[in-house]
Amino acid sequence: MAELLTNAAEYTVSEISQAVKRTVEDEFGHVRVRGEISGFRGQHASGHAYFTLKDENATIDAVVWKSSWPRLLFKPEEGLEVIATGRLTTFPKSSKYQIVIEQIEPAGAGALMVLLEERRKKLFAEGLFDKARKRALPYLPRIIGIITSPTGAVIRDILHRLDDRFPSHVLLWPVRVQGETCAPEVTAAIEGFNSFRADGPIPRPDLLIVARGGGSIEDLWGFNEEMVVRAVVASAIPIISAVGHETDTTLIDYAADMRAPTPTAAAEAAVPVRSELIACVDDLGHRTRNSIRRGVANDRDRLRAAAAGLPRPLDLVATARQRLDHAASNLLAALRHAGQRKTIDLGKVAPRLIPQLLRQRARELRARLLEGERRHDAALSRAVERRRAALAAVAAKLSPTALRGDLHHSRSRMAPLAARLAPAFGRLLEQRRERLSSLGKLLDSYSYKNVLDRGFALVTDAEGRIVRSREHVDPGDPLIIEVADGQIGATVSGAPVIRRKPRPPRESGEQESLF
């Protein structure tokens, strides 16, 4: 019991843990620890990040609080050797010490190059650097958007070069071109320019230039961030990358539609030289005008050659005019001679048209008509006698009793037939009526009376035969001329018909009779 008695102080586990925590924090404070990141699986659901720093002999737990994550210049990646700046502390619950990291930087340029190459291979495997995806730059952009620092020499060089080559409308989106906010600001600028509407208050650029001056790999690291590369790939506006000098290469150079070695070269690639364009347009205009002049001259020569082969207009109408003058000079004499011949012919025919001939023809026609009436009355009397004899023979056979029996029997048979016959007869009658109407219309269309209505006449002889030729009548024969409103009597006059030889064809230029 004596051995157990001591004056040593007694502590609880929590007191010891808190004492160790204070000792570690007071002794070390802020430290810089170099090691390789291990066990990094991204941010936790809470927003914090947990991993381990190790070397060949030891390990130390590390934590990045959610509030410190956005301020990191370099985000932790598995297997990357870094220098972590933070403060040492302990985690009393598990009696472990750890470093609370506030900033991370690669352990030298070699580590950055390794990280850059790994990131380049990853993005290349996703097809973000495919040349088939790159678009052609607009030949003459109306509006150019520039993403760079507003205070550096880069923006002055670009504006000066654009003003020398082809003055254009420029929109500047100011960003920081290095530091921890560089990548988010450049990404926001690219997305912001793409969000503009063509008809909005701020017009949408036709071309974007992302520019920065030269610097170390650490200074240019913001343009190697994955978010910037993906924003360039997703941009609907063509982008020229002009980051650093000609020897500097960043990941945005692989993703952009064109890489310019310097910001000045980017301005030269964006627009053509205005004076050269004006000279080219003037040259093209001069060549076009010369071509048109030569074409007009050639057409004029061909027109003159074609006109020389054509006859003169006066020669074309001279012959026709001569024929017209000849016909006009012969027309009056021909009319006068024709009138004289017709007067002589009328004088020869007039003496033959005397009333005695007409009265003789009328007596003959009256005698023929009376003879026809007598024959018709005799034939009608004979027909009536035959019908009367036949009716008397039939009446002798018809007794009243037989007639009533036959009548009753016939009535019983005819009643249903009559019921069926009435509608059928009505339909038949209607069909016959329609057919008769159509035939009547057809007959009217073929009737010669329609021809008479148009001014023609039908000529028949005394016996009613149609006279179709002058050879069918002789002088003195009576004729009946039927016109549209009645008949006209006439008598044939003139000399007997003599067949004459056909008249020889008239020679060219001979004036024919107009009658």
Image (cartoon, rainbow, N blue to C red):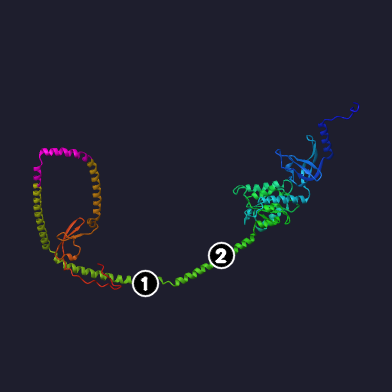
- 429 above or below 261? above
- Residue 333, image x, y percentages: 26, 71
- Residue 57, image x, y percentages: 82, 44
Question: With 400 as the anchor, is 236 left or right in this view?
Answer: right
Q: Determine if residue 329 is in view.
A: yes
Q: Which residues are magenta?
A: 390-419
| Three-letter amino acid code of the residue under disc 2 | Thr
| Three-letter amino acid code of the residue under disc 1 | Ala
The residue singled out by tag 1 in the image is 318
> Is residue 179 or residue 491 the one in the foreground?
179
Please say whether residue 250 is one of the residues in the magenta stretch. Answer: no
- Disc 1 residue crowd, few under 14, some 14–19, many 20+, Cα 10 Å: few
- 24 above or below 344? above
Distance between the alpha carbons at the discs numbered 1 and 2 = 46 Å
> Is residue 284 or residue 17 the one in the foreground?
17
- 440 above or below 472? above
The residue singled out by tag 2 in the image is 288
Question: With 87 as the anchor, is 506 left or right in this view?
Answer: left
* Helix, strand or loop for disc 2: helix
Q: Determine if residue 218 is in view.
A: no
Q: Quadrant of the N terminus?
A: top right
* Helix, strand or loop for disc 1: helix
- Residue 237, image x, y percentages: 63, 51
> Is residue 10 or residue 404 the one in the foreground?
404
- Residue 158, image x, y percentages: 69, 55
> Is residue 447 or residue 410 the one in the foreground?
410
Q: Earlier in the sequence, mark 1 or mark 2?
A: 2
Q: Residue at x 10, y 40 (%)?
A: 399
Kindly indicate whether the residue at mark 2 contacts the one at mark 1 (C-beta within 8 angstroms): no
- 185 above or below 506? above
